[in-house]
Image (cartoon, helix red, strand yellow):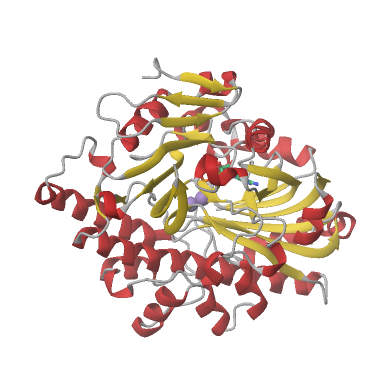
Amino acid sequence: GRHDVRRREALVWEMPQTGSMRVPAMLFGTEAALAAMEDGVFAQLRNVASLPGIAGQALAMPDAHTGYGFPIGCVAAFDARAGGVVSAGGVGFDIGCGVRTLVSDLDREDVEPVRESLADRLYDAVPAGLGAGGRLRLSDRDMDRMLAGGAAWAVREGFGQTGDLPRCEEGGTMPGADPAGVSAKARERQRDELGTLGSGNHYLEVQHVEKIFDSRTASAYGLRPGQVVVSIHCGSRGLGHQVATEHMAAMLAAAPGHGLTVADPELAFAPIESPAGVRYLGAMRAAINCALAGRQIITHLVREVFAALFPGCRLALLYDVSHNTCKVERHAVGKSVKTLHVHRKGATRALGPGHPDLPETFREVGQPVIVGGSMGTSSYVLSGTEASEALSFASACHGAGRAMSRKQAAKRFSAKGVVAALAGQGITIRTHTLRGVAEEAPGAYKDIEEVAQTTHALGLAAKTARLRPLACIKG
Ligand code: 5GP
Ligand code: MN
Ligand code: MN
C-alpha cells in the first residue's frame, strides 16, 4: 500500500525505508496524479527498494504505471561492489525499446495535401503488426554482426547514413554485447522480424512542431515551429522477449545458490558479477543492439518513402533514445561518485549539459529526451538538465504512461470511433489491428501535458518542443 507515502515537496513524494526496504522510494507528481496512480506502483516500488545493493533510492517517474516486476517508469541503480543485482524484470520484455525522432526540412503545409497517401506509403513500406515479416533474412553470421553492431551494423549494410550514428546513445552500438548468449530460439524469432515495427504501442508517426519552449535548445536540436518530424517507437521484437523470458527463468533458478530469496517471481534478479548476471547483461546488450538496428532500418525505409514524395528532402536523425535498458554509468550517491548499473524501465536517460557522453552538438544544451504522448495528443522533446543528476540518476519520463490496462481500454473505447474522431482532428491513422487502436486510444493514457509539466517543473528534463501528430502508423 500507499499509506505511508509522505509529501516532501510540491511534486516529490517519499515512501520511507521500512520493513525489507534497503533504501527509500521516491515518486514524482501532483497530488491528483499520485491519487490516480495504481496501488501496484507503490507495492512494486517497495519491492525494488528491497533489492540487494540498490543505491540512493528507487524512483518512479511521473508517467509510472504497474509493470511486470518493476513498475514501468521506474529507475533503480545498483552497486556491484555492494552486492548489487541486475534484474531482467527491471529492464522489461521489450529490451532496448525506444524512440528516435527524425527532423525534416518540410513544413506542415507541404505534407497536409498528401497526408493520406504519405500514410499509405509508410504503412506499405514498414512491416508492422504482431508476427509481421520483414524484408531481411539474416544468416547466422550476419545475425551475430547485427547483435554486436546495432545501428552501426545497419548503416554498414546500407541502411542510413554515418551521420546517424553520433545521434544515437552509445554511438549506435551498445558495447559489451554477447551474441553467443542469444539462444537459437531467440534468433529464430528474430530471423524475419528485423526492421518491422511490432504491435500495439509501437508507432511510426509523422508530427509537426506545434510549439517551441526554449529557442536556444530547439535550434541546437534543429527544431522550428511548423516543421515536420517523424518519430519511430519500437524495440527488439521477439528476440528481446525471448532473451528476457529465458534469463528471468535462469535468474530465478540461480537465486537460491546465492542465498537470495525472490519475493515476487516477476522480480527475477542476480548479482551483477554472478554467472547469471553476466550472461544476462551480455544478452541484454545484444538485444539492445537488435532494437537499435531495427530503428535504423525503419529510418531508411521512412527516408525512401519521403524521397519518393518529396524529392531531395532532408530527414536527419535528431536522436535515438532507448527506454528499456540497464547501463553502467557513474553517478553521485551522497558524497561519493559510484559506478552503478542503472535500470531504466520505461524511463529515458536524460544527460544534462556538459556531459562527456553527449555529442558535441548537444554538449551545451543537454540530451534530447523524446517523450511519446499518444496518437491523438501532444508528444514532447525535452532536454536533459543538471538537476536530474541529483534527482533521478539523470533520468526522465518516457511517455504519458498508461492510465488504464489494455483490456480496460479495449472495453471502454470503440476503435472505429477513435479513428473517426482523430480524422476529424486532422490525424490519419493506419493500423493492422482495430483492437490495437482501442487499446491505445488517447484516453487510455495519462495527461501528457501534466506529465511534461511535472517533469519540467522538477527539472528532471526541460520542455523544448511540443509535437502534434499528423499521421500515425500503429503496429
Ligand atoms: P511504452 O514504451 O511504455 O509502450 O510506450 C511509451 C509511451 O508512448 C506511452 O507511455 C505513451 O504515452 C506513448 N504512446 C503510445 N502510443 C503512442 C502513439 O501512437 N503516438 C505517440 N506519439 N505516443 C504514443
Ligand atoms: Mn516496446
Ligand atoms: Mn517503448
Q: Residue furthest front?
A: 335
- Where does the image place residue 400, in percent across and percent down from the top left? 59, 38
Write the residue at 67% across / 40% down. Answer: 419
- Residue 353's place in the image compared with 12, above or below, is below
- Residue 258's place in the image compared with 161, above or below, is above
- Where does the image place residue 284, in percent across and percent down from the top left? 36, 62
Residue 104 seen in render = yes
Write the residue at 25% across / 58% down. Answer: 277
- Where does the image place residue 29, in percent across and percent down from the top left? 57, 27
Q: From the viewer's side, name the closer residue of 167 and 402.
A: 167
Question: For this view, does 190 lie left or right of residue 452?
Answer: left
Quarter holding the N terminus is: top left
Q: Residue furthest right?
A: 109
Write the residue at 43% across / 59% down. Answer: 237
Write the residue at 29% across / 45% down. Answer: 53
Q: From the viewer's side, name the closer residue of 168 and 9.
A: 9
Choose top left, top right, bottom left or bottom right for residue 355: bottom right
Choose top left, top right, bottom left or bottom right for residue 341: bottom left
Residue 193 seen in render = no
- Residue 68's place in the image compared with 432, above or below, is above
Q: From the viewer's side, name the closer residue of 101 and 383.
A: 383
Question: For this view, does 403 lie left or right of residue 118?
Answer: left
- Residue 55's place in the image compared with 137, above or below, is above
- Where does the image place residue 257, in percent across and percent down from the top left? 9, 51
Q: From the viewer's side, name the closer residue of 142 and 147.
A: 147
Question: For this view, does 467 lie left or right of residue 89?
Answer: right
